[in-house]
Image: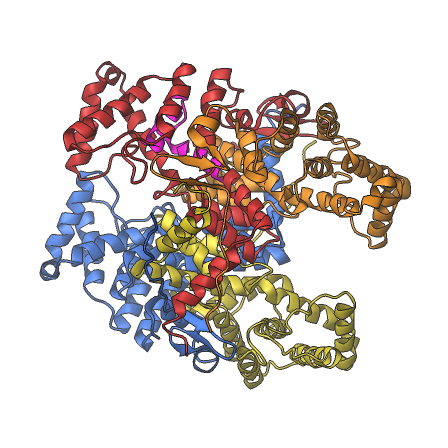
Chain colours: A orange, B red, C yellow, D blue
Amino acid sequence: MTRTPKPVRSDMGWSTSERIVVRGLDLPSEILGRVSLGDMAWLEIKGALPTPQQSAVFNALLVTLVEHGMTPMALAARLTYLGAPEALQAAVAAGLCGVGTTFAGTAEGSARILQEALRDPGARGDLGRVAAEIVADHLGRKRPIPGIGHPLHKPIDPRTPRLFAVAEQNGFSGDHVRLIQLISKEAERATGKSLPVNATGAIGALASELGIDWRLCRGIAVIGRAIGLVGHIAEELQNPIAREVWERIEEESSAHARPR
Amino acid sequence: MTRTPKPVRSDMGWSTSERIVVRGLDLPSEILGRVSLGDMAWLEIKGALPTPQQSAVFNALLVTLVEHGMTPMALAARLTYLGAPEALQAAVAAGLCGVGTTFAGTAEGSARILQEALRDPGARGDLGRVAAEIVADHLGRKRPIPGIGHPLHKPIDPRTPRLFAVAEQNGFSGDHVRLIQLISKEAERATGKSLPVNATGAIGALASELGIDWRLCRGIAVIGRAIGLVGHIAEELQNPIAREVWERIEEESSAHARPR
Amino acid sequence: MTRTPKPVRSDMGWSTSERIVVRGLDLPSEILGRVSLGDMAWLEIKGALPTPQQSAVFNALLVTLVEHGMTPMALAARLTYLGAPEALQAAVAAGLCGVGTTFAGTAEGSARILQEALRDPGARGDLGRVAAEIVADHLGRKRPIPGIGHPLHKPIDPRTPRLFAVAEQNGFSGDHVRLIQLISKEAERATGKSLPVNATGAIGALASELGIDWRLCRGIAVIGRAIGLVGHIAEELQNPIAREVWERIEEESSAHARPR
Amino acid sequence: MTRTPKPVRSDMGWSTSERIVVRGLDLPSEILGRVSLGDMAWLEIKGALPTPQQSAVFNALLVTLVEHGMTPMALAARLTYLGAPEALQAAVAAGLCGVGTTFAGTAEGSARILQEALRDPGARGDLGRVAAEIVADHLGRKRPIPGIGHPLHKPIDPRTPRLFAVAEQNGFSGDHVRLIQLISKEAERATGKSLPVNATGAIGALASELGIDWRLCRGIAVIGRAIGLVGHIAEELQNPIAREVWERIEEESSAHARPR
């Protein structure tokens, strides 16, 4: 039983002895020295260079997620680098593995509810009703609403108004932004609690405005964090802490069992 | 026997309920909407924002390494995404694990020989002699010289002159660039072969000009490739190939053993 | 605002200049040469050595998941090894990243429904009703029932009867096994399709019989596949295929765009 | 320019609707319930089942590397699991990424010098001379001799005599074992320091006796540690420490910069 092969095709790029082409552009003459890293990320994901407005909003999204201090991901990368300094790529990979549902990977949840709600063209005419339905559905199932509320940044996540302002200035303050804001208000009304749009919710809304599939939103965090993790390894080279963290925790965690 | 703890300190950033600070700058007001992704990477690694000249050269380096077509790393990321689409971060991590000594991780080799050679201030006065020593040492041990020659891009790697031009225009065409060029000429003279500076050599030289430790040079490739791998997953979402690649190779590789 | 530290404690093991202790046992004298690898895995997870019966069932579970031919995970590991042969650990890590919801990580789903259903002691008295409810619930939401049916292995997954026989012989054929079998029968009755218990369902049931938390079931696959991936790299060292796979797919995928 | 495809072939295994075959053996009837996990690892790597003697030595090697307490790798896995509990495989992958040149990946170094020295059949007749040359070469280049000495386990690594005893009892105490012991004695004579064979050296010697290529020796550590890391996640599920480690280190590391 032999299967019939299906075609395998990609438009990411190709090279010959003389040329290197990425997404249809000549890398040396049309990209190098002309396209910034953030715009290159847009080219990779979207297949064409961004407008200045798209670039402004997209760079702001990416930059938001680069650094958040000594996170579990940063610690994992530093501890891995201690064990395998010859494989810096594996240290960054180890840190990235933790971009999951607890922390930085969460914008996909808010992007998903916004994109699924607005897939129906009719929904756009009555955003208040859509917001009320989303809030009622989540409260009814006793589940948190993605993109709303923050354990630390209260009453306001300081990144949110800034991201919304960047979007507004560049013409990307559309229905997805309005919907997440209405969800926040409706959730606060229904629960009596302070539940502002958090950075995750703002990023989910802006990524949706930029036409980025919710299934790819975690990739925005991955790009940002990859940069942040290289930054942490740069600091670890200058001022290492991984060995001290390890030795302290090892000693404390087994002190009850060791002979005295 | 209790150990004395050493201090654990980092200057990457911190946050409170009201503020998020990265490398001493207020994230919402001083970074978001003002700093591009490439400049953010510089801030992370260097601790301060780049000059326009540093930004131009650094962005060109990073962008060079984003995309090189359907590499083994891109295939590994796509195959991993097929198995765990709910964990996009793990697919990118899998792809990054392959940034090693065979492919994209190689700029560290050329940066290392340049930085170690020019650590001695006296070496700067006689670059020709330094180049001759490096070439003689490698040829004597029958080892390839990092950053010189390319199996595909002959007689010239088209990225190299462009990268050197960007460096020249921005005042970063210093001794490291001159030394790698002299190494290339000396290697061609000694062997009679075409051994131009390849992109790896150019990146190693420019990273050195920018004051980036050779041990961190693989991180530049890691940042670039993380972006490229998210791009490949974006294409995989639209036009998947991983299942076809898997099924073809699985069938062919075991055809000799299967019952007919 | 300084936080009060909570204790950090572990019972996995410790070492001094003279001793190495794992889970309370002296590694050189009580483990090495006495405990097999599979039993060591049980000691790690459970905190004590297994009975011969537990060992027989647990080893069978682990062994089931080691090798399934040229999977996407095996390909990802081989492609990563091509790029970074100096970092074998990263190649295995890359392959493991793909143990997700599509393939080998799926036993946790069947273990979860079994464990959650039987948490209620009353459920044990009427397994038929419990099975009917689980089937009705999944069919009603048009979702597949974890552990039931297989796209390839029809009408029977050949691993299932063997795993159930090993469990029977060792006294581990309890309510979790009966429930998954009843779910299979009820699903076949309700749909009129052939929906046998697959290997994933059998593993989920046996892991539950062994008292392994469903949240840890993916770990059984991870252990098995880590071994399988080292096996694939052993073969890759003798008879490499990664470069050929890469070059073929690279050429075919970009053929439409390259100049002729 | 179209390339000629080379054959792609593997002997790891295959499956059809009715059969699953691994390394030529029928998985359900010839492996499940009959082959232990450690012997399955040998089958994967070697292509045939081990003799009882091979099994005894190989299981001892693998078991040695499973658990060494709260290592950097264990911490990295736990911190990653905190961020992405839905992707247990990624947490283990993150931990494995740290099996490098600093810690557990080091047996390949001692296996390499032993295997390269004994590749020459003549060397077997004069092991004392070979040992003296290896020691002189390393001391001359001021490099540590792999497999000799240990920072903590002095004067004897307690695993070494036990591993050598297991090898002796099973007929695997050959030239590789003798050579590493002679290297230790010669190094102690030449330096006047206590430089016993450490566990890494014993593992490198026994893996060589078992005919395992030094390039694959890191894979033995990877198998062992994959099991150990699943054990740490099992404990983390019962008694989590990752959040406490993270919060402590985050607070301490940025205390100097935060407003008071």
At 45% from the left edge and 46% from the top edge, which residue is drawn?
C254
Q: Nearer the viewer, residue D202 or C239?
A: C239
- Residue B143 sits in which quadrant? top left
Q: How many labels, in total?
A: 0
Magenta region's main secondary structure?
A: helix
Q: Is residue C155 magenta?
A: no
Q: Position of residue D140 (x, y in %)?
A: 17, 39
Q: Nearer the viewer, residue A15 or A212?
A: A15
Position of D195 with respect to C100 (left or right) is: left
Q: Position of residue A176 (x, y in %)?
A: 77, 38
Q: Nearer the viewer, residue C232 or D188?
A: C232
Q: Is residue B6 above or below residue C103?
A: above
At 76% from the left edge and 75% from the top edge, which residue is drawn?
C121
Q: Is residue B215 magenta?
A: yes
Q: Position of residue B206 (x, y in %)?
A: 38, 24
Q: Position of residue B61 (x, y in %)?
A: 44, 28
Q: Nearer the viewer, residue D187 or B42?
A: B42
Q: Tell me the quarter of the image containing the C terminus of chain B.
A: bottom left
Please state the extent of the stretch shown in magenta in the rendering: B198-225
Position of A168 with respect to C214 (left or right) is: right
User: Does residue D35 appear in the picture of this structure?
Assistant: yes
User: Does residue A97 appear in the picture of this structure?
Assistant: no
